[in-house]
Image: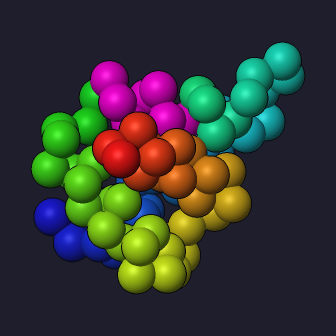
């Protein structure tokens, strides 16, 4: 799957969680990605972040950073 498609999908997830009250958006997004994204998709979005993360909304960027930190 292309990076552009993954960014679009991740940002859509972010737009769901960001406006919710009482929720840490980055944590909620990271949890969603862990539960519902294939490991290859998670690896690809982390690789995209490592290359600069173009197009990622801030909450999504923070969520993907959490996924990256879990891998190390």
Q: Quadrant of residue 35?
A: top left
In the rendered image, residue 62, in percent from the top left (x then y), is placed at 62, 52
In the rendered image, residue 59, in percent from the top left (x then y), is placed at 67, 51
Which residue is pictured at 43% across the width and 29% down the height?
A: 32
The answer, for residue 38, to whether it is visible in the render is: yes
Residue 14 colored in magenta in the image: no
The answer, for residue 60, to whether it is visible in the render is: no
Which residue is pictured at 41% across the width and 73% down the height?
A: 50
In the rendered image, residue 55, in percent from the top left (x then y), is placed at 54, 76
Name the residue furthest front.
Answer: 72
Which residue is pictured at 84% across the width and 18% down the height?
A: 22
Magenta: main secondary structure = helix
Label count reads: 0
Q: In the image, which residues are magenta?
A: 29-35
Q: Is residue 28 above or below residue 18?
A: above
Q: Is residue 3 above or below residue 11?
A: below
Which residue is pictured at 43% across the width and 62% down the height?
A: 8
């Amino acid at each position: 799957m292309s990076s552009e498609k993954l960014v679009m999908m991740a940002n859509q997830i972010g737009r769901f969680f960001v406006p919710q009250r009482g929720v840490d958006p980055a944590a909620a997004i990271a949890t969603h990605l862990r539960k519902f994204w294939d490991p290859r998709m998670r690896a690809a979005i982390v690789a995209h972040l490592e290359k600069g993360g173009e197009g990622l909304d801030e909450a999504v960027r923070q969520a993907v950073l959490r996924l990256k930190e879990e891998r190390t």
